[in-house]
Amino acid sequence: MRISILGLEDERFKRPLQLIANLFFEESQISCAKMEESEVQINFTLEVKENVSVSAKLQDKIGNVFKSNYQKEMVPFDSEKERFKQIKNAVAHVYLTVLQEWTGITQKWGILTGIRPTKLLHRKVQEGIPLALAHQQLKDDYLITDEKIELMQHIVERQLTAVPDLYSLQKEVSIYIGIPFCPTKCAYCTFPAYAINGRQGSVDSFLGGLHYEMRKIGEWLKEKGVRITTVYFGGGTPTSITAGEMDMLYEEMYTSFPDVKHIREITVEAGRPDTITPEKLDVLKKWNIDRISINPQSYTQETLKAIGRHHTVDETIDKYHLAREMGMNNINMDLIIGLPGEGIPEFAHSLAETEKLMPESLTVHTLSFKRASEMTKNKEKYKVAERDEVEKMMELAQEWTNEHGYVPYYLYRQKNILGNLENVGYAVPNQESIYNIMIMEEQQTIIGLGCGAASKFIEPDTGKITHFANPKDPKTYNDSFKAYTEDKIKILDELFSKKGSPA
């Protein structure tokens, strides 16, 4: 789909308009000038004074015309970035409206293309805005539908029940520890994950660097009196390393980090069932870690083979029962909607198999075509369901979780996600992952350790976020982990020494 945009000279509009076009069309091209071969032309009129006023007129090749107007008072701003954001949202408002009318497709998330929509509602709650008014503002400003606003409300309520002090945890941090190895690389994956076979030298070097990071960050936390809320071992697949390596890693955590016994939650992703052994479960139990993920993704064997997961459906079920027998009492499982070759029957089968196990939490992902994944590079090889069927699968997940006593407690969205939907974490009440809440709502600093781990440093007073990422490949990480650790400590020193901050 080729779209000519006229009347908007500022190049900064191009990317947000492209992202919204991508919600409607699998392949779209935006030009801020007239294209002779375009299928549709949209003329904008924009005026910014005390109010921002925008009108849009869409005309297609056969002469159909759709119009939209929008006006909103400009809120006081402290920077050009904040000013432009208000103008951009107003332009997006009329742009989305005419595209919805032209295509007949309603975008339930409105103009939102970001990852964390629930942050908008949290902000309004923190500002003391009455809920009815907050909901109306979300509807008016962003064109979010009632259905999605209701979902946001359920999630915000559940988060504040699970973490009553969510808005006052800036004095603490959470820790993410990235282990960049997996048995094999999945076709949809873009995480820093490397097939572990034949890489023992890289593993040894990487773990040496990781232990160093843990010691140095632990020293800083103890010195400053900063507590840890949660620790999350992700990756990759953290259970790809040996039981002995896991044992030494958790011993390092207990030795280096402050007051580990009072950390609210420690999670280890054991997502690939083919990495789970009795010896590794013994190690988890030894260090009082009982929240793990065992991720089937699908209970259809042909699907697992197609996406590069080399475990069997039976292995997933067997390892789940083994984990239960060995004392794991908070297990998460992941399912993915829209995997290649799967429709409603296959997804219904996955839910039926989940019912036999009843994990404490179930995260339902919607397939996203991530730019660097094998699946995106070879789309013709991986045929996926159409938008309507994907939406019906999501509805099926909502109905199933509701019927079985699960409640939604976090969500996030991704670009190029099928059906412009979302990923939703459901849990039995009081079994929610606190780390998932912390990473999504960005209420505190999260320190990333290990290969590919991203840190988010959040200023307590302003909420300003500074991103810092460790290298994604083991060799670069091994060559530079000391420098990266020093850089993180410098940021932490500055952040926690500011007036009104934790230290």
Image (tube, helix red, strand yellow):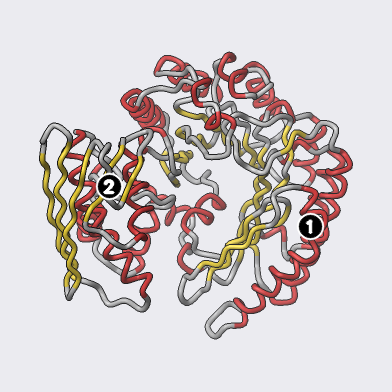
Q: Is residue 299 left or right of residue 31?
A: right
Q: Which quadrant of the figure contains the C terminus? A: bottom right
> What amino acid does circle 2 point to?
Gly
Query: Disc 1 marks which residue?
Result: 254
Mark sitting earlier along the chain (2/1)? 2
Instruction: Depth check: give the residue in front, 105 or 66.
Output: 66
Q: Is residue 16 left or right of residue 441?
A: left
Query: Mark 1 falls on what kind of element?
Result: helix
Residue 359: percent from left, percent from top: 55, 31
Query: Disc 2 marks which residue?
Result: 110
2 vs 1, front mark: 2
Relative to 378, say whether 171 is above or below.
Answer: below
Q: Residues within 10 Å of mark 2 (few under 14, many from 20)?
A: many
Query: Mark 2 falls on what kind of element?
Result: loop
Residue 394: percent from left, percent from top: 38, 30
Q: Quadrant of residue 404?
A: top left
